[in-house]
Image (cartoon, grey):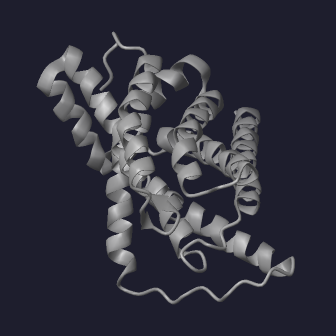
């Protein structure tokens, strides 16, 4: 539950401030937790930390516990189809990206068979996703959606999300072009997550599952994501976002006409 007394923009500023030590750590110790994932990625927990600090300032421990309980608020998801949406959109994007890249003549290795090692990776990504979504979804999404609507809220959160990743991406030597295409995909993903959040009963759990699947699909793409092409992924994800909102608008119009 977000306190009315704190601005979402204060939250954004606090998250950036809390991220600085992790960025410094990434420069001091340029190791990678996984291929393409610098140690500064441990700053994934700063959105949750920032939200909890602001909640505690006004609502004390009861507010903190209430926000933390949103981590497993799956009871909010009344229609179980939203579990499938959260789980399957990112694999669908990855499969399409793989097919398009192969069809365009790019030499890609066959995907590695899934093993038990996927399970601890998925759990780790889910925990890290909660570190972000307790803040992005549980604290910031609703006030932004109330003020500007689903798509603008998604775009704004996506921009902040992308900018927050700039330094970690540079620490693993990503080019400006790579980062630009990745940012397009990231903003598109956040628009989809903004839509998912509303339709899943405002579930942080659903948002965290979706977020975890983003990272899991990246690491499962051939050779631990080394063949990941942010241009292909970004354009496909943008098309998904456009298709989702176009379909929703058509359904709304058809229901209005039926009434």
Estimate the x, y position of residue 189 in percent, counting from the top left.
60, 48
Q: Quadrant of the C terminus?
A: top right
Estimate the x, y position of residue 160 in percent, counting from the top left.
55, 33
Q: Is residue 247 above or below residue 51?
A: below
Q: Is residue 186 left or right of residue 220?
A: right
Q: Is residue 42 above or below residue 146?
A: below
Residue pictured at 47% horizontal, 60% vertical:
37
Residue pictured at 78% horizontal, 74% vertical:
101
In-front residue for pair 141/251 = 141
The answer to which quarter of the image holds residue 151 is top right
Q: Quadrant of the N terminus?
A: top left
The answer to which quarter of the image holds residue 39 is bottom left
Q: Is residue 62 left or right of residue 54?
A: left
Residue pictured at 33% horizontal, 44% vertical:
45
In-front residue for pair 23/219 = 23
Estimate the x, y position of residue 135 in percent, counting from the top left.
38, 35
């Amino acid at each position: 539950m977000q306190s009315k007394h704190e601005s979402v923009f204060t939250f954004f500023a606090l998250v950036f401030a809390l991220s600085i030590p992790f960025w410094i750590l990434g420069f001091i110790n340029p190791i990678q937790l996984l291929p393409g994932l610098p140690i500064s990625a441990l700053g994934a927990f700063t959105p949750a930390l920032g939200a909890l600090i602001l909640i505690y300032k006004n609502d004390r421990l009861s507010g903190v516990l209430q926000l933390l309980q949103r981590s497993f608020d799956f009871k909010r998801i009344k229609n179980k189809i939203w579990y499938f949406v959260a789980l399957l959109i990112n694999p669908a994007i990855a499969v399409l990206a793989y097919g398009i890249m192969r069809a365009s003549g790019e030499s890609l290795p066959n995907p590695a068979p899934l093993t038990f090692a996927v399970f601890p990776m998925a759990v780790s990504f889910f925990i890290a996703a909660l570190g972000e979504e307790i803040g992005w979804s549980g604290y910031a999404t609703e006030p932004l959606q109330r003020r500007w609507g689903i798509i603008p809220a998604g775009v704004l959160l996506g921009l902040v999300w992308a900018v927050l990743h700039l330094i970690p991406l540079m620490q693993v030597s990503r080019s400006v072009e790579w980062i630009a295409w990745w940012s397009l995909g990231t903003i598109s993903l956040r628009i989809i997550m903004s839509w998912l959040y509303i339709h899943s009963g405002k579930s942080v759990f659903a948002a965290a599952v979706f977020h975890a699947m983003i990272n899991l699909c990246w690491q499962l793409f051939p050779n631990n994501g080394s063949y990941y092409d942010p241009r292909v992924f970004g354009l496909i994800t943008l098309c998904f976002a456009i298709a989702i909102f176009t379909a929703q608008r058509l359904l709304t119009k058809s229901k209005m006409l039926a009434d």
